Image: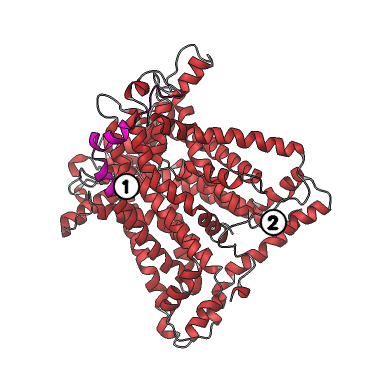
Amino acid sequence: MTTTTATARPGARAAGTGTPGAARGGRRPGRLRRIGLPYLLLLPALLLELLVHLVPMVIGIVMSFKELTQFYIRDWGTAPWTGLDNYRVSVDFDAPVGEALLHSFLVTCVFTVLSVGLCWLIGTAAAVCMQDAFRGRGVLRALFLVPYALPVYAAVITWAFMFQHDNGLVNHVLHDQLGLTDKPSFWLIGDNSFIALLVVSVWKGWPFAFLIVMAGLQNIPRELYEAAALDGAGTWQQIRRITLPSLRPVNQVLVLVLFLWTFNDFNTPYVLFGKAAPEAADLISIHIYQSSFVTWNFGTGSAMSVLLLLFLLLVTGVYLFLTSRGRKTADV
Amino acid sequence: MSSTLPAERPPLTRPKAPARSPMAAPRSFLWTRRVFLTLLTGFVLLPVYVMVSSSLKPLQDVSGEFRWLPSGLTIRPYIDIWSTVPLADYFVNSLIVAGAATVCSVVIAVFAAYAVSRYDFRGKRVFSVTVLSTQMFPGILFLLPLFLIYVNIGNATGIALFGSRGGLILTYLTFSLPFSIWMLIGYFDSVPRDLDEAAMVDGCGPLRALISVVVPAAVPGIVAVAVYAFMTAWGEVLFASVMTNETTRTLAVGLQGYSTQNDVYWNQIMAASLVVSVPVVAGFLLLQRYLVAGLTAGAVK
């Protein structure tokens, strides 16, 4: 079956990769004059990316080697160099700072795996369910995109209200109406906060997976299904043998993007818990934010951020290497 | 012209998914689908119901034990939200910031994507990879340095970027830029080159060809990118919480004003959440079909 899907892909991709060559071959007068044009068109984007992303990143790396406390904020260039001290503090897992960072890192890992997995699963299932037309599909699709469209803070504040101890919906249902718990639980502090965060994150995140998979489904040629039906494959078989394998290239990017966004997520925990996240839901972004802005120690904060970036680079690299290799053998 | 469109170009108005099976689906599939979609609808709608119903409740209903139905309907929260915190000011700030960031981001992305899609030049791959890899950077890593850069630019030149709307616009537009460029490259690739080459043969410069031929043909992709850029700017919390002051505060930060009082006015919080959500949700739902069409042609290939 992989060969059937593989034959469908190159055709679709050829249109994308074929264009640069076509640009070369174009018979246009005055080409010399226009050699600078592409650079000119890219310039604004490039300058902005430099200003807001790349230069700050370099400065961030420099800062991580300095002792940058509130005394040096006015003129950060004068902060003394400390070599690898900030890193040493960050990864000294026997001392409080390093131990807290390690804990936060592990919490974030577990949280990300669960959240991305659930978002992907629900999003894909919903998209596959809604592949053929049925009454009310358009309405349902619009409805499903609402969590994605809602501004993070508005949605998360509503969840925070639902998770309130005394006047929230969750305790009302679980304790008062269903009697599942002996006494009302605390959801926004203590161990339960991890569950609360996960629920909100999945609620907020799955529609993106749904959207992307839905778009991916439209690129599957109809003939594949017709051919499979002629061969006697039922709906379940068609989903397993055609739909899911055809989504592989889409999933490769989708899972990576979901992973990066979830791992770096700041907005959800920040709005849900406020500045001090409970230990069980102490995601790494919040943790670094706190270590920087609450203690005003930007040097250590930067070192932690750099370590985070290195980790994400490593994971992304390994992920792309593994998935691309798998794809190549399946495709070619 | 339309006959030259490549086959995989999506229909611009109503994307129709390929029907899976010419045969009727089995009962097991239909029932699984029914149960799953019903549960999912409940999950999705629950907070929406809480938001809408609580915003119409009197304060004692949201302070005491949760009630599914209000003891009495009131629109009082919708009046009070404007005076409890200066919500109108936050609203205007958010509109200016998100609007300006969207316009700038789309224009810049169109230029950049056109260059990558239509020209072959040195450094093209480096550019694409660099732009996409910025998605990987944790916001927290460049929050601190950016904060310092803006403060220092302000000290050196007198251009106030820190605490100003301008600084926030600049920051937000780069957030949506990578994804926008990436998506538009795919979209422009699916606009047949014959179109702009024909225009250039007619004597148009490349920029004229871009604006009068390629852009109109790529409207769904551009709309999709604009929606994405606006939503990104409208919903961002981290940079807004650090980079704004009393006068430039956006909704993302301003909404927290209702809960720092001695009383937490949950009905007002819900009313305000609803009010700030309406513009984006309405716009998104109106334009979502473009987003799907744009994603189909651009990002998902």
The C terminus of chain A, quarter of image? bottom right
What is the CA distance from the residue labelled 2 to the residue labelled 1?
41 Å
* Secondary element at image label 1: helix
Kindly identify the residue that appears in the image at 49 percent across and 32 percent down: B46
Is residue B44 toward the left or the right of residue B160 in the image?
Answer: right
B127 or B103, which lies in front? Answer: B103
Q: How many marks?
A: 2
Q: Is residue B277 above or below residue B213?
A: above
* Secondary element at image label 2: helix
Q: Is residue B146 above or below residue B33?
A: below
Mark 2 Cα within 10 Å, few/some/many (few <14, many 20+)? few
What amino acid type is highlighted by mark number 2?
Answer: Thr
Residue B284, position as x, y percentages in the image: 46, 50
Residue A154, position as x, y percentages in the image: 38, 38
Q: The numbered mark 1 sits on a residue in which chain?
A: B
> Which residue is the extreme one toward the bottom?
A29
Picture quadrant of residue A158: top left
Instruction: Decide whether residue B76 is among the magenta residues.
Output: yes
A19 or B293, which lies in front? Answer: B293
According to the image, label 1 marks what residue? B143
State whether residue B185 appears in this view.
yes
State whether residue A89 appears in this view.
no
Kindly identify the residue that appears in the image at 45 percent across and 58 percent down: B225
Is residue A212 toward the left or the right of residue B87 in the image?
Answer: right
Magenta range: B69-93
> Which residue is the extreme one toward the right?
A231
According to the image, label 2 marks what residue? A329
